[in-house]
Amino acid sequence: MSLGSSMRPCGDFRTSYASDMTIFATPVTRYLALALIGLLLLVPLFGSPYMLNLLIQIGYYGIAALGLNLVVGFTGQISLGHSAFFGFGAFASAWLNNSLGVPVFFAIPLAGIMAMLVGILVGIPAGRIKGLYLAIATLASQFIIEDFFARANWFTGGSSGAMAEYITVFGFTFDTDQSYFYVVLFYVVLMFTFTSNLIRSRDGRALVAVRDHYLSAEIMGINLTWYRVMSFGLSALYAGIGGALFGHYLGFVSVEGFTIILSIQFLAMIIIGGLGSIYGTILGTTFMVLLPEVMEWGVHLFSGAMPELIQSLAYIKEMSIGLAIILFLIFEPEGLAHRWKRIKAYWKLYPFSY
Amino acid sequence: MNTELLLQLVVNGLIVGTLYGVVAMCFVLIYKSTKVVNFAQGEFLLIGAWTCWWLLVKFELPFWFGFPLTLAFMVVFGIALQVIVLRPMIGEPIISVIMVTIGLSMFFQALMGLLFGHETKSYPQVFDTASVDVLGMQVQSAYILSMVVSILIMIAFYYFFKYSKTGLAMRATAFDQQVAQSLGISVKSVFAAAWAISAVVSALAGIVIGMVNGVSSALSFFGIKVFPVVILGGLDSIVGSVVGGLIIGVLENVAEFVDSQWLHIGNLYVIAPFYALVIILMIKPYGLFGTKDIERI
């Protein structure tokens, strides 16, 4: 589960609970993580705009996917309506800024909290039903909230959509990809650190207990309804913040953007990354953001031979996502996080693999 | 209050409702015998309708030849899908099974878009269309045809499960897989048969709808609309799916009527079944006819 379980030297056994519960198992992994963040801080200085755009996408989708992983991977409740919360966050942030004059800097976390309230509302059925029935209930909520977006002119601007301003702090406007990258990076580090800490707290362990055996969890005194509903609320909080970042990055939020397809993409991110794995979420999000780009590159490569391929690019992207979900579930159901562990174990044990 | 319009809408609802009932029956068939929730049910309609359209228009086959050919293709398709994609999923957690059918749905929807484009295409004229007078209302003969076909399918389902050997084997498997296996029933072939039958009957429904409304990607929305129906009727009840289909079909038309007369919210036709779905899940999660899940510790 922790970042480098196979990087621990042989014979390094844990002797206290504190050492068992650290986020980073060894100092090496901690320094590696810090070095990665340091490296990312340097990216805007020399990265191309295209690369920055992709990294920002990975950032805001990653935050939302992490929320979904919290509810699906850690609590074991299925949610098919995640993109509705993502969209709600985007509209809420734009609405707070445009209609109430809240500065964008505060509007983003507030949008997260508003999305959380919606998430709790949607999660109320989770107190009563579970598994498949819950999946269908969240599917219904996806359509209902989508319908709300199209209808609530005062909130979303209706079919014309909503404008979202740039973030301004002390007179400095984050209006370029370079500067916005730091905003997204800040939120990514914040949310991922928060999640890592949440999972090793009492509440986080309760969530995992609900997933593993809900009856045992209830017998041990865990309030099932509370944790199920709260996990929905929390996941919506993440989605709301991710959505708000998405909205203020694009500058415009359209009603059509938050369909069931996006919900499926979020689910694909966490399944490809690995359910119940925090760094797997980032791996899965990276995969899902890069997959359409790779498809586009491939189509342009073959467009000389088959020029009609360009027109059907959208279909090819969608097909590749569907195919990736199916192939991963058949051949690597535990996701990229598990594959990464296997690769590390292979090199660590090489050439004696037993 | 416009009584004539209301009556017309209720009749429309019953016609659409029987189609919902047929699709829901196919969905329930798969769920009951293989415990897989098929999110790709709508794509079966889509694939069936497009295949038939392709055979009739591109190859200009006569209907009596192209139609059985489509059904034969759907048998192969359903079995192939079960063997290649769903069989490795046996024993996996429920989220994986749901996601794999969602993946299938996404893949085939895009594939059909790639092959046939996104415009609505109409079938060549197979039967004469005319308005028929039913209880003082004008109803398109194509609608009557679709209703008759649906009812025939339902009756066929009933006799198949009541009397045929395969049908009995499928019911036994749905009841208890291990016992069925020990009595010499091949559970593997029952699973494949369930997918094949579901694919064929869905395709049939897809072709019927395609003849009335034309073929387009909108057909796959039937696969989503099927959820309110099966939740209302009970996830594992064939009778429930028929009753649920009729109720949801009438409900969405009445919602449309109420909306156009008094509320003026708009789009209630599409969204009302989902509100109904949430309400049913809150008060009676196992539906009208579903078996209640009793857990033992």
Image (spheres, rainbow, N blue to C red):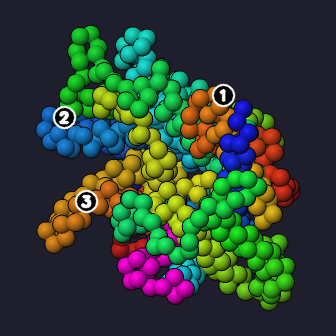
Q: What amino acid type should be assigned to the residue bearing mark 1?
A: Trp
Is residue A293 part of the magenta span, yes or no?
no
Image: B59 above or below A28: below
What whole-number distance in Å separates the C-alpha atoms at marks 1 and 2? 56 Å
Residue under disc 3 on the same chain as residue under disc 2: yes
Secondary structure, mark 2, is: helix
Are discs 3 and 2 less than 8 Å apart at CB? no
Q: Which residues are magenta?
A: B46-65
Which one is in front in this view, the residue at disc 3 or the one at disc 2? 3
Q: Quadrant of residue A320?
A: bottom left
Q: Is residue B49 magenta?
A: yes
Residue B170 location, x and y as percent? 77, 78
Alpha carbons under labels 3 and 2: distance apart: 33 Å
Looking at the rendering, in which quadrant would you find the N terminus of chain B? top right
Label 2 sits on residue? A44
Task: For mark 2, name the chain.
Answer: A
